[in-house]
Amino acid sequence: MAKRLTVEEKRSYAFKKIIDKMFELAGYEIVLEDVKSLPPNWYSIYTMSDDEWEKWQEFGKDVLQKDLKLSKKTASVEMSFLSLNYGLKIDNTKTLRLEKLKDILD
């Protein structure tokens, strides 16, 4: 019979899933485990746009509600803490650079 996960194991798994999704939505091909091998200033190199951040927030809230059975309000508070502690820096010029690049290529 399979061992049931503890609350802490479920929480760790959910947070890893949310952080991995953050990198995916921001367009980076890395996961949480890869962060250990990045240079110390990695957090200033990797950024996300407002739109990517909003998608990540919605994804994270859904995961927390489904996997950890949190209420909407509690999931929202947890995502605020996750964003503050582990979230990528928001850089809207990234979106502008991508739009300019698309215009140049079109």
Image (cartoon, rainbow, N blue to C red):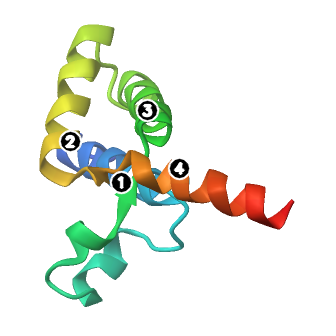
The answer to whether marks 1 and 4 mark residues whose Cβ atoms lie closer than 8 Å is: no
Of residue 86 and residue 49, the one placed in the foreground of this image is 49
Q: Is residue 69 left or right of residue 43?
A: right
Residue pointed to by mark 3: 63
Quarter of the image where one finds residue 33: bottom left
Q: Which mark is residue 82?
A: 2
Q: Residues within 10 Å of mark 2 (few under 14, many from 20)?
A: some
Which is more foreground, mark 2 or mark 4?
4
The answer to whether marks 2 and 4 mark residues whose Cβ atoms lie closer than 8 Å is: no
Q: Which mark is residue 96?
A: 4
Residue type indicated by callout 2:
Leu
Indicate which disc, 1 or 3, sits on the residue closer to the N terminus: 1
- CA distance for labels 1 and 3: 11 Å
Q: Return the x and y of residue 99 as percentages of the image width and height.
A: 64, 51
Quarter of the image where one finds residue 84: top left
Q: Quadrant of the C terminus?
A: bottom right
Q: Which mark is residue 41?
A: none
- CA distance for labels 2 and 1: 9 Å
Q: Is residue 73 left or right of residue 101?
A: left
The answer to whether marks 2 and 1 mark residues whose Cβ atoms lie closer than 8 Å is: yes
Residue type indicated by callout 3:
Val
Is disc 3 placed on a helix, strand or loop?
helix
- CA distance for labels 2 and 4: 26 Å
